[in-house]
């Protein structure tokens, strides 16, 4: 139990510790169960092309897929599902299967296949974080793999054109989001008041859609219409993922100061983005830049409402 | 207004005794069970080229009036449009659960069946290749089955199952059965008193696994470990397949599935 554990995964941006859904899932689970995990973001290493991200290394054991990593953590007595009944454990498996079948294709499409999103956001982001010759090859490879996966699992007859496939996967994804929202209802986590494996998986899949600023946004817009899911993501981000990603940070509730600091950072980032957009639109240097001055903190340090209002 | 269900509705699948494979038989039985539960009469027609006749390339498909619908999901929606539904009495959260469990069965059980049939070399050589191309003359039978194998292996690679070994796949099947068993508990059906499409789907897969003879019995042993699942299959078989006429095709299908599918 005292063996140090190290997780290698893609880095993050836009307020997230990582952009990769599976890495986020593992990190969230580690935070929920209190596992001491050192997180290394892959930047200049050649380990990335092996395709196994995230990778957990503990002493000499190397484990690669999220399900296996979670199993390993459970065996090390870091179990977030301790209080679940057998039926709830079964429900967890079922909902994870739902996420993988219905939501993952649309997620892959938004990140890797949609031409505008891929060229303007994903590829530059990824290429800026990995070493030179690899940055020319790896984004293209991941994009082709994503397209392949979508076509093979979803693209058979009677859908013959790619736009029909796209329409279907987005429809499935929106239905999946609706189902998750209905299941979550008004409770804080999926099984009561403590987060479990299912919360980790849902967070891992939803947070990239929710936070990353893409030019083509329809899935994000649909997600924003489901306020309980947005609140779910924000809660986990503010409570469990504080400012730094690497190093040990115990799960717990923040003080209002830490919340305020994080919110201020996010608001400043958003206001910079909006300033830039304004400049581009108006093209008049005399026009005073708009600053967002409202920073209302609701009671208890919840900051989800101003974040929602700031979406471009 | 819903159109009435015609008398001559037909369900097409591959040839029962010589050609059909584990996964296709499971899907076909699931659809038959669903239609029985809705009390809609259907006769089963076996054709060697059923896969090619189907609009989506997958069996089974039903031919009702002048419409052709394939696969359980679209068939459920089609039947609902005609005014019959098994899941109307469920509330929103239960419907979400039902859909999630159906995805679990498709994701784990169906994929495991496909893996066993097409990626496990022993099974492929001894069972799948001889059965799949059996209605056709040489060399067409070998060409068709190699083509299908290549397709399935490509899909397995894309979803990450190609790297799994057979024990790992069986482990996944066990996990899935455990989840289903825990969800079913001591109830007669998954959503207490009334069967739904989830019950039909689970029945189709589990019954086929239990009654199909493969190279080893490992797959059916995994299901037999859970007594409430075997009791569930027995109950549905008795209620929906044996209580009809001896000549009805559905009962014949269930009886035929009992016979060994090993050539």
Image: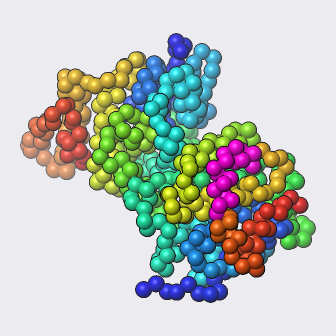
For the point 52% across and 18% down, the residue is: A5
Q: Position of residue B120 (x, y in %)?
A: 79, 47
A25 w.r.t. A254: above or below: below
Q: Residue furthest right?
A: B138
Q: Is residue B224 magenta?
A: yes
Q: Is residue B227 left or right of residue B3?
A: right
Q: Nearer the viewer, residue B124 or A34?
A: A34
Q: Nearer the viewer, residue A180 or B190?
A: B190
Using the rendered view, name the quadrant where residue B132 is placed. Answer: bottom right
Report if residue B222 is visible in the image.
Answer: yes
Q: Is residue B105 left or right of residue A309?
A: right
B34 w.r.t. B96: above or below: below
For the point 55% across and 21% down, the residue is: A76
Q: Is residue A190 magenta?
A: no
Q: Nearer the viewer, residue B79 or A118?
A: B79
Q: Position of residue A261 (x, y in %)?
A: 21, 25
Report if residue A101 is visible in the image.
Answer: no
Q: Position of residue B197 (x, y in %)?
A: 55, 64
Q: Position of residue B94 (x, y in %)?
A: 43, 56
Region in magenta: B220-236
Q: Nearer the viewer, residue B91 or A53?
A: B91
For the point 24% across and 33% down, the residue is: A266
Secondary structure mostly seen in magenta is helix
For the point 29% across and 46% down, the residue is: A186
Q: Is residue A63 left or right of residue A286?
A: right
Q: How is the image coloured?
A: rainbow
């Amino acid at each position: 139990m005292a063996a140090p554990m190290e997780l290698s995964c893609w880095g993050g941006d836009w307020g997230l510790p990582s952009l990769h859904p599976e890495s986020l899932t593992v990190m969230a689970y580690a935070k929920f169960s209190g596992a001491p995990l050192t997180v290394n973001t892959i930047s200049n290493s050649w380990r990335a092309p092996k395709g196994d991200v995230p990778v957990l290394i503990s002493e000499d054991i190397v484990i690669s897929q999220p399900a296996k990593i979670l199993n390993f953590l459970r065996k090390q007595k870091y179990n977030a599902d301790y209080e679940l009944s057998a039926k709830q454990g079964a429900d967890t498996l079922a909902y994870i299967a739902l996420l993988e079948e219905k939501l993952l294709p649309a997620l892959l499409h938004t990140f890797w296949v949609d031409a505008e999103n891929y060229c303007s956001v994903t590829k530059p982001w990824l290429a800026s974080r990995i070493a030179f010759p690899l940055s020319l090859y790896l984004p293209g490879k991941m994009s082709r793999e994503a397209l392949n996966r979508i076509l093979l699992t979803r693209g058979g007859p009677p859908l013959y054109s790619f736009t029909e496939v796209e329409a279907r996967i987005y429809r499935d994804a929106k239905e999946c989001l609706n189902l998750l929202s209905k299941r979550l209802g008004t409770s804080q986590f999926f099984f009561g008041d403590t987060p479990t494996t299912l919360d980790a998986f849902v967070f891992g899949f939803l947070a990239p859609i929710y936070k990353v600023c893409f030019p083509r946004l329809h899935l994000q817009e649909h997600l924003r219409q489901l306020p309980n899911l947005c609140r779910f993501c924000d809660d986990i981000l503010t409570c469990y993922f504080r400012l730094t990603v690497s190093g040990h940070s115990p799960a717990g509730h923040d003080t209002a100061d830490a919340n305020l600091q994080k919110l201020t950072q996010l608001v400043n980032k958003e206001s910079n983005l909006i300033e830039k957009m304004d400049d581009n639109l108006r093209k008049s240097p005399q026009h005073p830049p708009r600053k967002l001055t409202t920073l209302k903190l609701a009671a208890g340090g919840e900051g989800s409402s101003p974040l929602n209002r700031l979406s471009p | 207004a819903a159109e009435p269900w015609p008398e001559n509705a037909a369900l097409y699948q591959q040839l029962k005794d010589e050609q059909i494979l584990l996964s296709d038989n499971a899907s076909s039985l699931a659809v038959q069970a669903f239609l029985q539960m809705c009390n809609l009469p259907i006769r089963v027609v076996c054709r060697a080229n059923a896969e090619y006749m189907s609009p989506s390339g997958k069996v089974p498909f039903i031919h009702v009036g002048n419409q052709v619908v394939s696969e359980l999901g679209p068939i459920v929606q089609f039947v609902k449009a005609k005014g019959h539904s098994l899941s109307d009495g469920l509330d929103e959260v239960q419907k979400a659960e039902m859909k999630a469990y159906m995805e679990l069965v498709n994701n784990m059980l169906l994929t495991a069946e496909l893996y066993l049939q097409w990626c496990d070399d022993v099974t492929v050589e001894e069972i799948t290749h001889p059965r799949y191309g059996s209605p056709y003359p040489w060399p067409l039978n070998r060409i068709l089955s190699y083509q299908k194998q290549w397709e399935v292996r490509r899909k397995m690679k894309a979803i990450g199952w190609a790297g799994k070994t057979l024990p790992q796949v069986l482990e996944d099947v066990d996990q899935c059965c455990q989840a289903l068993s825990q969800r079913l508990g001591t109830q007669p059906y998954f959503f207490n008193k009334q069967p739904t499409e989830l019950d039909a789907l689970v029945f189709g897969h589990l019954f086929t696994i239990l009654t199909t003879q493969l190279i080893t019995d490992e797959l059916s042993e995994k299901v037999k470990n859970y007594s409430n699942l075997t009791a569930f299959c027995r109950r549905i078989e008795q209620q929906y397949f044996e209580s009809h006429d001896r000549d009805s095709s559905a009962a014949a299908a269930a009886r035929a599935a009992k016979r060994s599918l090993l050539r």
